Image (tube, helix red, strand yellow):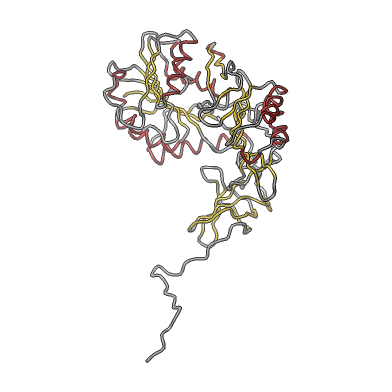
Amino acid sequence: MAKPVRGLRFQPSGGSRAAQIPVGKKQRLTIERLANDGRGIAFLEGRTWFVVGALAGEEVEARVLGAHGKVVEARTERVFSASDLRRPAPCAHAGRCGGCSVQHLPHDEQLALKQRMLAEQLSRVAGVEPEEWAPPLSGPEFGYRRRARVAVRWDAKAKKLEVGFRAAGSQDIVAIDECPVLVQPLQPIMSRLPAMLQRLSKPQALGHVELFSGSAIAVLLRHMAPLSEADLEILQAFCAFHEAQLWLHGEGEPQPVDPDQALGYRLEPWNLQLAYRPGDFVQVNAGVNEAMVAQALEWLAPQADERVLDLFCGLGNFALPLAQNVREVVAVEGVATMVARAAENAASNNLHNTRFFQADLSQPLSDAEWAREGFSAVLLDPPRDGAFEVVRKLASLGAKRLVYVSCNPATLARDTVELVKQGYRLKRAGILDMFPQTAHVEAMALFEAS
């Protein structure tokens, strides 16, 4: 009887499987071009490499962050042959912090990259080009961010508290003592925050910290266990020194330590004050936000006798300025607390021609009471997944003009296909540089009924 053969390995019918590339491996690469997210693309031995911090034409040494199949994600460790476009990174934490991925590109080249990303999506997905390209809407490239989340984690093995921003391509925390994109009022808080948190008695119970700068400065601490009186005194003294409000987020919703304190921001051109609470969505770039609202009103050209619909209205960022120009604004939002906050903002600004409704805007527009009278114009500002179900029924509302504010060119292009089917034409489009030093693209598009 033949002896059985043990341990036989059968090769799959698809051929031999390529060995996986280990995380941390360094590889010399020649970058062919830039991807839509600003990473360099290289090709080696049948794999496609996406390299953070690399530019087209460069020869770099890249460290592997992760690999799946034939796609490798990496970051630039050294540049052997630099592009003429490369500039010294303005931030000392470049290459480690995951926040600003294209700061090695001059700002005008960042804008050009974002413009190409928008144009490519509209052309490839929707097969259209706007009749007119609007110039980029931008502001200062540094000192613009009025809101930031700071990661906090207790390292039990090292017995130390890590405070900073997430690293590129990992959950590691990079210690940050200065962040060039934060607004100036938040800089001293950011630099002194780690030392203050390390004084607290239960560092393992700390979550994250959020910083806010608007009509007031605020510090929010997320904590998973009750704070001691001594810890509360440390936090209050820190905030008093920086003339900042202290908010705590334990169980339930975030609350200010002083219940009489409130947060908000101004829309100065319209003499409006909008209240918000931590957790509410607000645009982090105040200057570009005001310019965006002004451009949206200019493009939509609202008339005094018109009824206008604002979808995904949030706190009323567009609805309240619109209300100053039209007969009535109907504003719709999916989150009930935001609807209530927007209605309060309208009332506090003495605007009584606005109506706010809660609705699930991921579903088709039904025969809602607020939609029955129709609208002359529509403005929508959806989240990253777009507004596909909403735009499918927009023509039935009778709107002749539509301004679409997008934070994702891919879903804007997808929704454009549907709008074109309904008889709208893309009159104008342009980028909004809400996040300089990153490859994140926001855009605005004007559609008109044919």
> Residue 273: which quarter of the image?
top right
In the visual, does 1 lie left or right of 222?
left
Q: What is the x, y in percent for residue 128? A: 39, 35
Q: Quadrant of residue 340?
A: top left
Residue 142 visible: yes
The answer to which of 396 and 3 lies nearer the viewer is: 3
Left/right of residue 313 with respect to residue 83 in the rendered view? left
Name the image quarter holding the N terminus: bottom left
Position of 7 relative to 433 (above/below): below
Q: Is residue 109 visible?
A: no
Judge by depth and name the residue closer to the eye, 133 or 17. 17
Q: Quadrant of the C terminus?
A: top left
Q: Residue at x 44, y 32 (%)?
A: 383
Q: Residue 448 location in percent, x, y?
A: 36, 23
Between 199 and 27, the one lying in front of the other is 199
Residue 441 screen position, x and y as percent: 51, 35
User: What residue appears at the point 52 percent right and 25 percent down from the top-left corner?
Assistant: 282
**In the image, is residue 204 above or below residue 16?**
above
Give the number of marks. Answer: 0
Question: For the view shown, which residue lies furthest in the bottom direction?
Answer: 1
Q: Name the residue nearer the viewer: 239 or 302.
A: 239
Q: Position of residue 295 (x, y in %)?
A: 49, 20
